[in-house]
Amino acid sequence: MSKSDDDEAELVQLQLALIALQKKAIKDGDKILVVFEGRDAAGKDGVIARITEHLSRRATTVVALPKPTDRERSEWYFQRYVEWLPACGEAVLFNRSWYNRAGVERVMDFSTPQQQEQFLRDVPAFERMLVENGMRYVKFWLDISREEQAKRLKSRREDPLKAFKTSPLDAVAQEKWDDYTKARDEMLMRTHSDIAPWICVRADHKKAARLNVIRWLLHAAGDKKILKGVERPDPAVIFPFEPAALEDGRLAR
């Protein structure tokens, strides 16, 4: 079989394991929360689609919130996200999350420096509360190179089937690359913790990124029966954040 065929065969195996994991989570009343962040065009949609493709529609929710309303802007910042958190037996996947405040809002001046600083101070305590109250929480940062981002953004613009993937922010993603890098670095440094670590994914190669994210989720669950035959995540593709990754080439500059 070709490498592509091998990848597809592994994806099916991993999706079957995800189904088994969800059945167990529903039975045990687990609350599963997964956050996906990353550069524009880093592949969040594709990863989430592969994870949820065969899962229970009733027990699985993908959340991709639009920009806040005037009323929501007056609320406690985390308030509109809290209403989407999972109950027992549910899995919720955020396609971008409260971390907008540390990324696009900072780069595009959609919030004040004071609001951004308060967020960075508050979010570790917020996430600690989630975990200590029984949430099974994983947060992924999908990282791509500047060259790969340019290629994917160009493909979006030229493919009419990708019309809903484009946004006005795409136009400045390359122009403000260095600003996004600086925002990413501070976010990872200040919001990575033992209880809610960032899991970084080198996502220039889409299939490898997708397979390794699913492997990570399955291994994080730690059920030996479900893990039978599931390869370990590749540390060249996916790894817990550490400050050295900002300088040694694992995360794009």
Image (cartoon, rainbow, N blue to C red):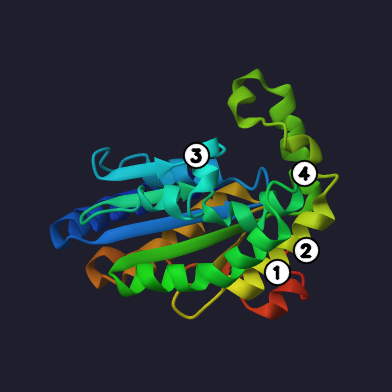
Q: Give the CA separation, mark 4 to mark 2.
A: 13 Å
Lower position in the chain sequence, tag 2 or tag 3? 3
Q: Earlier in the sequence, mark 1 or mark 4?
A: 4
Compared with residue 131, is residue 39 higher up or lower down, i.e. above or below? Answer: above
Residue at the spot 77% in from the left edge and 32% down from the top edge? 154
Circle on res. 186: 1
For this rendering, which residue is in front, 92 or 2?
Answer: 92
CB atoms of marks 2 and 1 within 8 Å: yes
Residue 79 vs residue 235: left or right?
A: left
Camera-nearest label, 4 or 3:
3
Q: Position of residue 85 (x, y in %)?
A: 34, 53
Q: Amino acid at mark 2?
A: Lys
Among numbered discs 1 and 3, the one appearing first in the sequence: 3
Please rate how many residues cluster around mark 1, counting C-alpha atoms within 10 Å: few if below 14, some from 14 to 19, many from 20: few
Q: Which residue is tagged 2? A: 182
Residue 136: percent from left, percent from top:
33, 66
Neighbor class of circle 4 (other Cα within 10 Å; few <14, some 14-19, many 20+) is many
Secondary structure of residue under mark 3: helix
Which mark is on residue 14?
Answer: none
User: In this orientation, does residue 100 appear?
Assistant: yes
Of labels 4 and 2, earlier in sequence is: 4
* Between 149 and 128, the one nearer to me in the picture: 128
Distance CA(mark 2)–CA(mark 3): 30 Å
Q: CA distance from mark 4 to mark 3?
A: 28 Å
Residue 71, labelled with which disc? 3
Please name the amino acid that badge 1 sits on. Answer: Glu
Q: Which residue is located at x 52 percent, y 78 percent?
A: 193
Answer yes or no: is residue 2 visible: no
Disc 1 to disc 4, how far (Cα)? 18 Å
The residue that label 4 is drawn on is: 173
Q: Determine whether 167 is above or below 124 in the image.
A: above
